Image (cartoon, grey):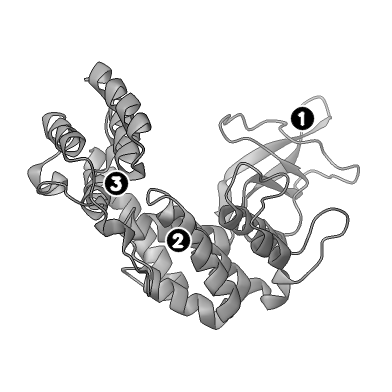
Amino acid sequence: MREFRAEDARSEARRLIHDLLGERQPTAASLLGDAATVLGAERTARCAELAQGAALTRRSSELAAIAGLLVGTGVLGADWWTSGRGGKIPAPDEVLAANTAIEPWIDLTVLEMLAAWIADDGADAAWGPPVASVDLNSWQAEDRVELPADAVPGARLVVAFDAGGRLDAVVVERPDGALGSNLDFSSLRYSRAAEAQWSWGVAAGLGPHPLPGEDPDPYADTVDQQAAEYLRQWALRHGATGEQVGARWQAKGDVVAAVERVDWMWRSGEWFAWWRATSALLGGDPVQLASRMEDIASAS
């Protein structure tokens, strides 16, 4: 069942990214080539530089953010990058150049922050500014938003729930005559930029994602062989197949490819310790790796 859910997600992602970018098997090279046409060579080179500087476990997420920026720019126009926001909020081009995230996105990388920004702006352009924001970790539908003074029964109010994500709150009259609202979960939708970011990341997977002209190849770096074999055997003991795990892991590219194939996020909870250990293996810090190996040994 877990394998079916993972494949369903990938199939939907491949469908979406084909609709948005014309790619069924997206690659870093094709993405950056398309981005150069829409964003311009200089912006694209800066985006690629930031993606290259990320950890290999994060590179796919950074490239997915570029996909969101590519599609969002196609919707909103290149002027989006140079438009000032007033006050303390700089233009997107300034944020990209400075490589410093700003409020309220400081927990994201700069590329992820810009992707969230353009996803929200695209949603506002498509459906208007939201009247409120809700957390969909709670699926309570009734009276989640404060109604505007001119609300009338039957009106549909746009509500934000995520970067680029929107749904409607329908104004209703309660039995006592008071006005309230019900969230219409069937109206849930995402802007095109948000769809592009999600679908590129899922369709392309963790990698490897070598960048055009990248030398030396970071995926060719060797890893700690003893730790690598322990983690490989751990995966086999906990349900991964030999085809998924692959042959002996010698280089970082072998590890990344195996992590992508085993679909660890769709497995049981102890696989999170495996993911943290493989991430430390890729990071190459011996102290961090030793700590994560202790964690997975205790979780086995």
Q: 7 or 148, which is in the foreground?
A: 7
Mark closer to the chain start, 2 or 3: 3
User: 17 left or right of 164?
Assistant: left
Q: Amino acid at mark 1?
A: Arg
Q: Residue furthest bottom?
A: 37
Query: Label 3: few (<14), some or many (≥20) within 10 Å?
Result: some
Disc 2 and disc 1 in contact, CB within 8 angstroms: no
From the image, tell me which residue sits under label 3.
6
User: Tag on residue 243?
Assistant: none
Q: Give the Cα separation between the discs numbered 1 and 3.
A: 42 Å
Q: 283 or 64, which is in the foreground?
A: 283
Q: Is residue 174 above or below residue 228?
A: above
User: 48 left or right of 211?
Assistant: right
Mark closer to the chain start, 2 or 1: 2
Q: Is residue 212 above or below residue 242?
A: below
Q: Amino acid at mark 2?
A: Gln
List x then y, in percent, for residue 255. Answer: 24, 47
Q: Is residue 225 visible?
A: yes
From the image, tell me which residue sits under label 2.
52
From the image, tell me which residue sits under label 1.
174
Q: Which quarter of the figure is the C terminus placed in?
A: top left
List x then y, in percent, for residue 145. Answer: 75, 36
Judged from the image, the secondary structure of the residue bearing numbered disc 3 is helix
List x then y, in percent, for residue 232. Answer: 16, 38
Q: Is residue 138 above or below residue 10?
A: above
Judged from the image, the secondary structure of the residue bearing numbered disc 1 is loop
Query: Label 1: few (<14), some or many (≥20) within 10 Å?
Result: few
Mark closer to the chain start, 1 or 3: 3
Judged from the image, the secondary structure of the residue bearing numbered disc 2 is helix
Q: Which quarter of the figure is the N terminus placed in?
A: top left
Task: Quadrant for residue 148, please give it.
Answer: top right
Q: Is residue 239 visible?
A: no
